[in-house]
Amino acid sequence: MESVPDSGDSSTGDLFVHCGSLTIEPGAVVRVEEGAGFVIGADDYEASLLAEGTVDSPIRFHNGKTLSFGKNGAAGLVAQGTEAAPITFTSQESNAAGAWDGVIFYGNVEDEQVILEHVVVENGGAGALDGALHFKDAGGSLDNVEITNSETWGLYIEGDSSPTLGEITGEGNAEGLIYQE
């Protein structure tokens, strides 16, 4: 298992986690430059990302493109913030709707390893994604998730997707908060 402390470092290209687990420590700020992606579980490998913030050390992801999970290999995302310190997925520099693509979960995710609790997703919904959070033939669990300022839907669920939905809130999403095929 790899661990990333808050070093202030930035990625200058696509960031891949091919196998194993990546833990983001409380207080870390993860920045991925505009036009680059963050890919977990690519090329038929198994990988997961664990991000657990605290009240004093919330975690913020600043991204330029797409956070992709389980497209080619088994993957997961466990992002468990708290009410006082949610984990935020947002754009690198702009507060505009569609400033980045968003987070997508494909069919190879391990459903029990996709947990989003006390998470904020803002300024996404650009590119090929139909929502700032997009499930394509995938499952998982979402509770206390706020999705705001998406250029498209807040949460888009398609195909054989079956995420368990708790409290999902949001505003300013151009197409609406939740779409499910």
Image (cartoon, rainbow, N blue to C red):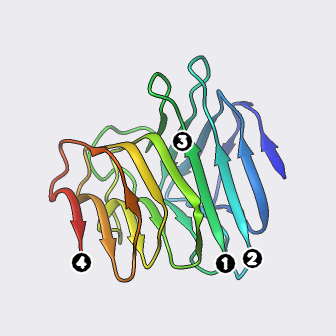
> Where on the picture, by quarter, is residue 125?
bottom left
Indicate the secondary structure of the residue bearing disc 4.
loop
Between the residue at mark 3 and the residue at mark 1, the CA separation in whole angstroms equals 22 Å
Residue occupied by mark 3: 61
Residue occupied by mark 1: 73
Which tag is nearer the camera, tag 3 or tag 1? 1
Between the residue at mark 4 and the residue at mark 1, the CA separation in whole angstroms equals 24 Å
Which tag is nearer the camera, tag 4 or tag 2? 4
* Amino acid type, callout 2: Tyr
Between the residue at mark 3 and the residue at mark 2, the CA separation in whole angstroms equals 23 Å
* Amino acid type, callout 3: Phe
Between the residue at mark 4 and the residue at mark 2, the CA separation in whole angstroms equals 29 Å
* Amino acid type, callout 4: Glu
Indicate the secondary structure of the residue bearing disc 1.
loop
Vertical relation: 111 (above or below) 102: below
What's the residue at 47%, 32% (across, down)? 86
Q: Which mark is residue 181?
A: 4
Marks 3,2: beta carbons within 8 A: no
Circle 1 Cα neighbour tier, 10 Å, few/some/many (<14 / 14–19 / ≥20): many
Which tag is nearer the camera, tag 4 or tag 1? 4
Label whose residue precedes the other's in the sequence (3 or 4): 3
